Image (spheres, rainbow, N blue to C red):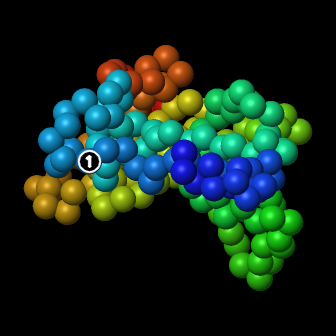
Amino acid sequence: GRIEQALEDNGLSENTLIVFTSDNGGAGYIGLPNINKPYRGWKLDHFEGGIHVPFAAKWPAKIKPGSVMPAPVHHVDLFRTFAAAAGAQVPTDRTLDGVDLLPFVRGEASGVPHETLFWREGYHQSVLNGGWKLIRADQPDQPAGTPRKKWLFNLTADPTEQHNLAAQMLDK
């Protein structure tokens, strides 16, 4: 609120992009067992409780209040979005992840910003595609011949990841 008030006091609120988000879900070690409710998981894992975070943007001059974009996005999108908002060119001498989210938020682009998203943290690797999420844990201290742990969720039908379909849907 103080930041918004300072922008207002200085005549900058209409044309300033404000983004509110978090880098991950709440950590299990802080002693708040329901911090990521209704999602399972914590910071440093790939269950929704670890990666599903608030993401809100406000820019009165460019984003209509109440606009909603339900598609998943990633923090790698922030660089391209901020560069586009500022009218800055992004480097072309390297491959950059992420997309400019503004056309999607304003309804100027159809579809979704990402067909597929990937995560890797420690021993977890995950992919989200078309509402399906696969998490694979590959612990180095597993006994030889022990299969990797795998979780497969249909987030459209099961957003809180209660039903692991990995053993039932091997083809998926």
Q: Residue at x 35, y 37 (%)?
A: 49
Q: Secondary structure at mark 1?
A: loop
Quick check: can you spot residue 62? yes
Q: Residue at x 70, y 54 (%)?
A: 9
Image position of 109 with respect to 4: above or below: above
Q: Residue at x 80, y 48 (%)?
A: 14
Q: Indicate the position of residue 67 as horizontal and vertical percent values.
A: 74, 30
Q: Nearer the viewer, residue 74 or 148?
A: 74
Q: Indicate the position of residue 48 as horizontal and vertical percent values.
A: 40, 36
Q: Is residue 73 left or right of residue 15?
A: left
- The residue type indicated by label 1 comes to Ala
Image position of 156 with respect to 28: above or below: above
Q: Residues within 10 Å of mark 1 (few under 14, many from 20)?
A: some
- Work out which residue is located at the far top of the displayed protein and give it: 157
Q: Indicate the position of residue 23 as horizontal and vertical percent values.
A: 45, 54
Q: Nearer the viewer, residue 90 or 8?
A: 8
Image quadrant for the N terminus? top right
- Work out which residue is located at the far front of the displayed protein and give it: 9
Q: Indicate the position of residue 37 as horizontal and vertical percent values.
A: 32, 27
The residue where tag 1 is placed is 27
Q: Is residue 120 left or right of residue 45?
A: right
Q: Nearer the viewer, residue 85 or 42?
A: 85
Quick check: can you spot residue 148? no
| Quadrant in the picture for residue 130 | top right
